Image: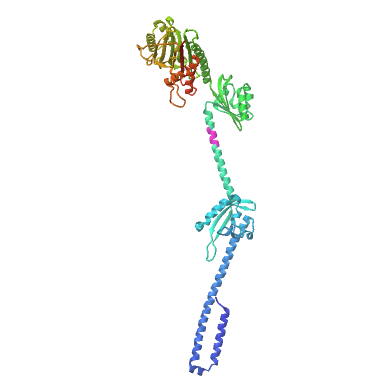
Amino acid sequence: MFDPIMSERLAQAEARMASLHQRAGYSLLHQQGLLPDAFEELHLTIEELRSAEEELRAQNEMLLAARAQLEAERLRYRNLFEFAPNGYLVTDLDGRIFEANQAAAFLLNVSPLDLRDQLLSSLVYDEDKSEFRLRFSALQTGARLETPQEWTSRLCRGTLPFYASFTIIPAPRFPMEAPTLRWMVRDVTEQREAETERVSLAAREARQAETETAHRKITSILETITDAFITLDREWRFTYLNASAAQMCRAVGKDPEKLLGRVIWEEFPTALGTAFQTEGLRAAETGRMTEFEEYSHGLGRWLQVRIFPSENGVAAYSQDVTARKEAEIALQAAFEKERRVSGLLENLLLRTAPPNDFPHLSIETFYQAASGESRIGGDFFDVFTLGKGRVALVVGDVSGKGLAAAELTAEIKYVLRAILREVEQPAPAMARLNDFICEAQRQGDLGSDHLVVLSLVTIDPETGEAVSLSAGGDPILLLRKNGETESLGSGGLLLGVHPGAVYTENHFPFRPGDTLALFTDGLTEARQQGQMALLGYEGLRQLALRGNTRRTLREMGQTIMEGAQTWAGGVLQDDACLLVARRG
């Protein structure tokens, strides 16, 4: 840098050197030669210094110009920083504020001096601080400081929050200076609210479009369904009728277009006091759907009505169920008829013989239907006298259920009685019954899909002579007085399968104190609840042995029936018939 004092001293040195050179004797100096050389060398040195001075002067002028330019740039930057329309902050890497311009101070409603040394995170709205710190923590890792970062958070202007957009730029780092961050802060509340409103408006328009589309679809559906549909407001005025409801109104002399806005009770006074009024009021009061069936005298039809409450009133669906209702009434009448007929057949098929009808012979009968729908089916028992004082014990099972099976059962039961009283011997009688059934099925009198299982015992109560045979059933169980048991013949061909079948008789003594048990497969095929295990013949034998220890024959039979039901979990899967007889 040029020094004016040094320049003045150089000028003074030149002047003294000139004065010395004049006062010195020329001849003496010339002769000796030393002093002139010294002056010459000193002159050259001064000239070099003069040249260096000129260079310093030029450099000094350049430095002064650069300094003035830097100062102008500094002032321009300062003005740009201070008076920029956007807020600017300068912070360290921890977010501590070094500088803040006027716009930033205005945004935050705090003076620039008061902002210094504050942490920027302290100015963030409480609900946004967690997200702000998370983003700033990622920024502090250093890897992302090479590029500008942007995000939006809410800052506090006094106690009120506003949306601020941040643009963070790393400041140039100079040697011996700590790294800093430059923050541009803009209030974007209006843009944010406008965007929110735009999105909200778009959402509302989308919802409205969806509602209109859904309304058109629902209206289209309601106009095409066969159910009558109406809506009523909270004052019970018509607000909508579909095509089916309009047609129903025309059928009773009402113009559907004139009903809109009119009160239903005034237009249809006959509906007062009906289920429609009581259920409609209940639905409106409770807020729950109600459903009922009612006969419309005006339409002459049965209607099934569902009433649904809504915020605006109620909606009602009416479906014509006349055909179903008439079918139900007819079915109920048929059921009642079948029940009456079944009652008559029950007296015929399950009539219990008086206890004293057969001297020297005690008999008890039991019947358990698998379902309460029809007590009478194909299972039956019979006890009747034959010639020469003999008694016939019969237990049978005709395939099928209900009235048709009961009618066939009654016919077979009484045909067997007639044949046994004519033929007397069990085997020929069974063969004739089989042929009768086969021929009746061939001719279509008994149908073609019925099979008959039958167990038969004839006894002479006086002598104890007895004959048994079976057509497809389980063996008849004989319990001796001494506790032993015997199985009396099985395996005979089912009745009604093949004409000309031959059956084999089994003769045995029926001694005093002995007991017979004849039964259908509803007992032996009782299935254990939740499993595949059947009670079986052996299970029934064990129940009979247990029951044989009871005091009376009735108690013995009850032990067998209750044991089978317990095995099946309380409900038998098939009808069950049991006949027990004891010689006294």
Q: Main secondary structure of the magenta part?
A: helix
Which residue: 55% across, 90% down?
20
Q: How many marks?
A: 0
Image quadrant where residue 385 sits: top left
Near-viewer residue (148 or 180): 180
Q: Which residues are magenta?
A: 211-217
Query: Can you see residue 318?
Result: yes
Near-viewer residue (408 or 349): 349
Q: Above or below — where is 297 with respect to 239?
A: above
The percent coordinates of residue 522 (x first, y second) are 45, 19
The percent coordinates of residue 505 (x first, y second) are 37, 11
The quarter of the rendered structure image containing the N terminus is: bottom right
Query: Can you see residue 449?
Result: no
Question: In screen coordinates, is 289 left or right of 501?
Answer: right
Residue 82 forms part of the magenta stretch = no
Near-viewer residue (41 or 551): 551
The percent coordinates of residue 40 (x first, y second) are 50, 87
Which residue: 52% across, 81% down?
49
